[in-house]
Image (cartoon, grey):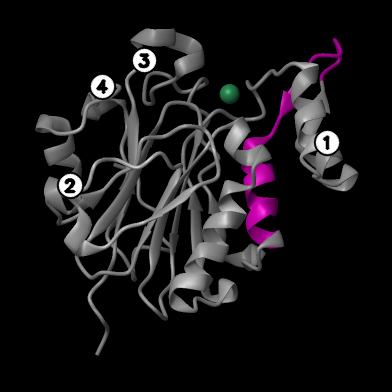
Amino acid sequence: MLRCRALDPFVQHGFTSRQLGLRPGERAGEAWASAAASVGCAVPRIGRVRQVHGAVVRVVRAGELDHPLADADAAVTRDPGTAVAVVAADCVPVLLADPVTGAVAAVHAGWRGTVANIAGVTVATLTREWGVEPSSLIAAIGPSIGPCCYEVGEDLLRAFDEAGHSSIDRAEWFSRDAAGRLRLDLWRANTDELVHAGVRPANIHVAGLCTQTHRDVFESFRAEGERAGRMAAIVVAPSPRS
Ligand SMILES: [Zn+2]
């Protein structure tokens, strides 16, 4: 499990690796039990979502954890001891925590979610629900496919354009190699979306670990297709600080 040093003093959290052996679609079982135990939590206390590459955020309450999984790509909570988690294999997992209110979030941002500004929508949801000041949030962007490997089609440029992302942002997020092949930097894009939402750049911590480059350590859908397992990103809402 990888942890972000900046989040460590405030919340139990982590990004699992290939070692966990988590399978796609797995909702309980040994892998989840082990991931939960690593953050001092239990599987029934984890708020999950059915990830659909959109921009819907699920607000998780301790008393509603047994509800059927909602279609969403981020989950937020502020109930102490309740966790939220997403899974990914190349897509970008983002964990957020607010040391002031104790609100936390887990975000799954593939290219579609990034087009839809899921990171920004999640920050806005934290503010709406609990009055979170974006400037106090700490963010960790976990292992995911990096700009070194993420070759994409021209249609993605169009999708980001049509969704209203500025030409300045698009110029930073997309690049071409010597052969003219287009690459997308999802780490940079999600960092910028958080900054646009009011998160301080100094509070955003990017692991900078590419899942496809380090496929011995991480799960990569691009590298392994349907055989790829998943990695969980999980964060637990802390007890109020006295
Ligand atoms: Zn790479």
Is 181 in the magenta?
Answer: yes
Question: Which mark lies nearer to you, 1 or 2?
Answer: 1
Cα separation, mark 2 vs mark 3, equals 21 Å
Nearer-N-terminus badge (4/3): 4
Q: Are marks 1 and 2 in contact (CB under 8 Å)?
A: no
- Residue ID for mark 1: 161
- Residue ID for mark 4: 23
The residue lying at 69 percent from left, 18 percent from top is 151
Q: What is the three-letter code of the residue carrying label 3?
A: Ala
- Residue ID for mark 3: 228
Nearer-N-terminus badge (1/2): 2
Magenta stretch: give its range.
Answer: 177-195
Q: What is the three-letter code of the residue carrying label 2?
A: Ala
Is 182 in the magenta?
Answer: yes
Cα separation, mark 1 vs mark 3, equals 31 Å
Q: Locate the N terminus and report the quarter of the image it occupies.
A: top left
